[in-house]
Amino acid sequence: MRDFRKYDVWALSHQLALEVYKITSEFPSSEKFQLTSQMQRAAYSIPSNIAEGCGRDSDKDFNRFLHIALGSAHELEYFFILAKDLSFINVQKQKEL
């Protein structure tokens, strides 16, 4: 079994999830069960799928969970664009994230 904590991609995605929670806490309360929730779920899906994949016995299963994490990363990328277009974050924050 792999130790997910040893992967830089896991550590970076964990930091990203923390940052998403931080910035979405400043979103309008009307977005609590909409964009805020969706962004948070996509954000924590990335490191959690990496961690779950590390617990699998085969490289094929590990690879499958990495692809799921990548899909969540793309979903989150869109949410950053949407948040910027809704003026919840600025262009610089969108590019940074």
Image (cartoon, rainbow, N blue to C red):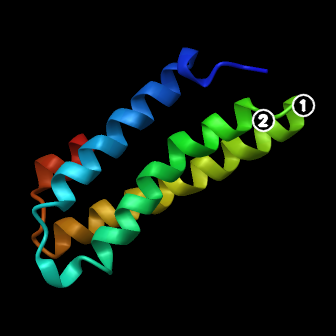
Residue 34 screen position, x and y as percent? 32, 80
Q: Quadrant of residue 40?
A: bottom left
Residue 14: x %, y % from top left: 41, 35
Q: Are marks 2 and 1 in contact (CB under 8 Å)?
A: yes
70 on left or right of 75: right
Q: Residue 6 at x, y = what percent?
A: 56, 14
Image-based side of 3 in relation to 73, left or right:
right
Is 23 situated above or below 7? Answer: below
* Secondary structure under the numbered disc 1 in the rendered image: loop
Other-residue count near label 1 (Cα within 10 Å), few / some / many at <14 / 14–19 / ≥20: few
The residue closer to the viewer here, 12 or 54, is 54
The residue lying at 62 percent from left, 37 percent from top is 50
- Tell me the SS state at disc 2: helix
Three-letter residue code for mark 1? Ser
- Residue at 51% x, 27% y is 9
Q: What residue is disc 2 on?
A: 62
Locate the N terminus by quadrant. top right
Q: Quadrant of residue 60?
A: top right
Q: Is residue 26 above or below residue 96?
A: below
The label on residue 7 is none
| Image quarter of residue 3 | top right
* Type of the residue with mark 2: Phe
Question: Which residue bears the numbered disc 1?
Answer: 58
| 92 and 12: which is toward the camera | 12
User: Is 32 situated above or below 76?
Assistant: below
